[in-house]
Image (cartoon, rainbow, N blue to C red):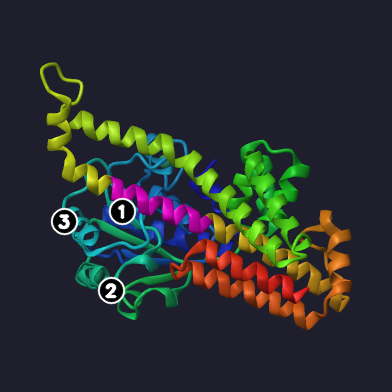
Amino acid sequence: MTVWQEVVDQEEAVNQLQLAVKDVAKAKTNTASAAFTQTWLITGPPGSGRSTAARAFAAAIQCEQGGCGECKSCKQILNSSHQDVIVIAPTGLTIGVDEARELIGKAYLEPSIGNWQVFIIEDADRLTAPAANALLKILEEPPTRTFFLLCAPAAEDVLPTIRSRCRHLGLRLPRTSQVAKLLVDRNGIEPELANFVAKAALGHVGVAKALATNSAARLRREQTLQIPLLLDSLPSCFVQAQNLYDAILESVEAAQDDKDDSEQNELLNAFGAGTEGVKKSRVEFLARAAMKELKDDQKSQRTRAIRDQLDRSLQDLLSFYRDVLFVQLGVEVELINDELRAPIQRLAQRATPVATRKALDAIQESRAAISASANPLLVLESLLINLARAA
Ligand SMILES: [Zn+2]
């Protein structure tokens, strides 16, 4: 295998990165003639594999064989445990100026085991303006052995001043056939299930993997797609909104509770918990500032996880109404939710294409509201009322 195998259906982008890797390799032997870019902006819609591409590139730069995927360095980078490849992923809704300054401090150090130091900034669109401004200088003139790989949904999502300092690499949403192939080849998923989830995930590799390997995620998708059929009265809109919100909350809590507890215990241990002769109250007193910071962090992680999962459900609803619209317009395409063809046809007969378009707009507006930090339950309630009216 090579490090590029996980970068699904991105031939052109991979070609560009491989050429860049060759330039970097030349620099190891003859720095004078080497010309290569150290700051990159990797963009693509969610699911296109921005951070996967960034990791593959980082591994290929560090690897003696240009990204074999087999050596210790490649393996460490792909599973995020390499000392010289540092991934900055926002735990909360933004990346602030403190995190940016910490990164700058590290960036001026020499690589510890590899030839280069690579910083991967996931969701660079979440950099606050002060954080972005703090980074301008180092992106303009990066330290000799340092790379910055910024990832964002679209180039317009980062400040023009950041954008202009980076080489841009665009990724596309992979074709569902290629996503299904990856699931079969790399995750051993049955072809039929792989095809189904790749289509349901609309080409989003991570979502497809989650659907393929997590039956609870598949069940929630199924339940979400029933919602349009259950909105026959105002009270039912409220009930369905609450049910979906509760299901999302439950799944986020199940994923976070254990992790939060063990992080908190780890912190207390660092302050001497469990050491003989050290009182518990003393440990708690000493750790209180750090504990508050950790708990705030964990809280914003939850908020973000809830928003992400809700957005996923809204995308499922979008796919449903898109199918309804295609049936209404008589467009001969394969439905995304072909298993629901009968109810989709029923709904298509009951409403007009204009009403279905309104439903699609309402869902998109709700997604925008959620990403702008509106109250998720209120957004859901108002959406379902709008969807009921559209039917
Ligand atoms: Zn390697």
Q: Mark 3 and mark 2 in contact (Cβ < 8 Å)?
A: no
Where does the image place residue 85, in percent across and percent down from the top left? 32, 48
Q: Mark 1 and mark 2 in contact (Cβ < 8 Å)?
A: no
Labelled disc at residue 129: 2
Q: Tell which of 331 and 143 is nearer to you.
A: 331
Q: In which quarter of the image is ligand 1?
A: top left
Q: How many numbered marks are there? A: 3
Q: Is residue 248 at least partly visible in the picture? A: yes
Q: Residue at x 29, y 51 (%)?
A: 296
Mark 3 lies within 8 Å of ligand 1 (Cβ measured):
no
Figure quadrant of the N terminus: top right
Where does the image place residue 374, in percent across and percent down from the top left? 46, 68
Q: Which residue is drawn at 55% across and 68% down?
A: 379
Chief secondary structure of the magenta span?
helix
Q: Marks 3/1: CA distance? A: 14 Å
What are the residue bounds of the magenta stretch? 295-308
